[in-house]
Amino acid sequence: FDASRSGAEWWAQVRGGDGARAEGIEFHWDVDEHQCDRARGVHVHPHLSTVTYLSAHGAPTVVLDARSRASSPRATARLHGPLSAGAVSWPCVGKHFVFDGSLLH
């Protein structure tokens, strides 16, 4: 552990439940956005990614066995092929889901 190079990032998603057109979150890899901007697209993934559910409503989180070891968005876009495994986590109040931060979800 190197405190000068370590940290945490969090963000929240609020999705309308009022009959408005459903908004989704597209499949993505978590990356250090600051490093990506600073180093011209270099992808540095977190060791772990987490999802914490505050309600029991909404679509599940799907995690696929597709790792981005690419160093740029262009290289990542070229990744393709069969998937060997995956996981689905359905919303449940207070549930905390943890997975490898380099996986597509």
Image (cartoon, rainbow, N blue to C red):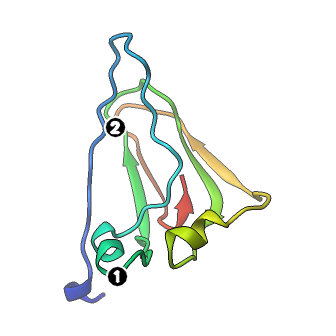
Dividing the picture into quarters, in which one does residue 21 lie? top left
Q: Vertical placement of 96 versus 48: above or below?
A: above
Which corner quadrant holds the N terminus? bottom left
Q: Horizontal and vertical percent for residue 41?
A: 41, 74
- Left or right: 57 with respect to 100? left
- At 35% across and 17% down in the image, what residue appears? 17
SS class, disc 1: loop
Residue toward you, 93 or 68: 68
Three-letter amino acid code at disc 2? Gly
- At 34% across and 70% down in the image, what residue appears? 32
Q: Which residue is under mark 2?
A: 94
Three-letter amino acid code at disc 1? Ala
* Disc with the residue nearer the chain's start (2 vs 1): 1
Q: Vertical placement of 83 versus 17: above or below?
A: below
| Badge 1: residue crowd in 10 Å (few <14, some 14–19, many ≥20) | few
- At 61% across and 63% down in the image, what residue appears? 77
- At 52% across and 35% down in the image, what residue appears? 60
Q: Nearer the viewer, mark 2 or mark 1?
A: 1
Q: Vertical placement of 24 versus 40: above or below?
A: above
Q: Horizontal and vertical percent for residue 98?
A: 45, 56
Q: Which residue is under mark 1?
A: 39
**Measured Cα–Cα span from mark 2 to mark 1:** 36 Å
Residue toward you, 38 or 64: 38
